[in-house]
Amino acid sequence: MEKIQYISHGNIKEDQELNIRKALDAGVKWVQVRWKNAPEREFEELCVKTQLLCKEYQAVCIINDHVQVAKRMDADGVHLGLDDTSIPEARKILGRNKIIGGTANTLADVLQRIEEQCNYIGLGPLRFTATKEKLSPVLGFEGYQQIIRDLKESSISIPKIYAIGGIVLNDIELLQSTGIYGVAVSGQITSQPSIVNEFIKLMK
């Protein structure tokens, strides 16, 4: 599983598509299509286009929230928030072979996601981020350290945890030292696609 996810960004379809294309050109191999409050038809058009682009670039295409859209277009999977479709329900709809990721903010959320057998967990936010509405309480580096420590102390095998929420290149070394698996990045890759190579080097 890729260690760097690009979470798409843009207020209109053209911006979203341009940013996704730039990220793929820069070397991203995993795109999560995330466009909150988008017109339904335009969102689906963007997802179909992204899926085609990802196939062309041999990248993974995950859809945020919209399980039925992911099923219709045969995306690689979905990412689900705590208030979205449940992971067991999504698994029934999409089948066993699709990637299903779940958001978590606390140790209890992580344990819930492990129980639900999602493929990876997006844990965060690391810090305040303007790209997310209804932001959960900020974890900070200490939050990641504590959650991973608690899992180890309970002898629970550490799932694939991606740090998320305002992450920039300078955070990578400290985040990796906490024991997380990967990172999900939106803002910095959107504004500076060429930085993808630096992320890839650090996340090996």
Image: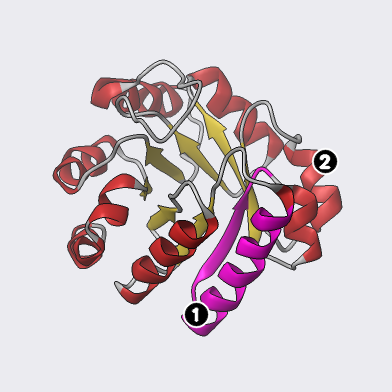
Q: Residue 78's mark?
A: none
Asked if residue 15 lies left or right of residue 74, the reply is left
The percent coordinates of residue 55 (x first, y second) are: 56, 80
Q: Please, is residue 104 above or below residue 161 in the view?
A: above
Q: Is residue 198 magenta?
A: no
Q: Residue 89's mark?
A: 2
Q: What residue range appears in magenta?
A: 41-65
Q: Residue 58's mark?
A: 1
Q: Which residue type does callout 2 highlight?
A: Glu
**What residue is at 79 percent from the left and 60 percent from the top?**
71
The percent coordinates of residue 139 (x first, y second) are: 34, 21
Q: Please, is residue 192 above or below residue 34 in the view?
A: below
Asked if residue 160 lies left or right of residue 51, the reply is left
SS label for mark 1: loop
The percent coordinates of residue 198 (x first, y second) are: 17, 62
Q: Residues within 10 Å of mark 1 (few under 14, many from 20)?
A: few
Q: Please, is residue 36 above or below residue 30 in the view?
A: above
Q: Which residue type does callout 1 highlight?
A: Gln
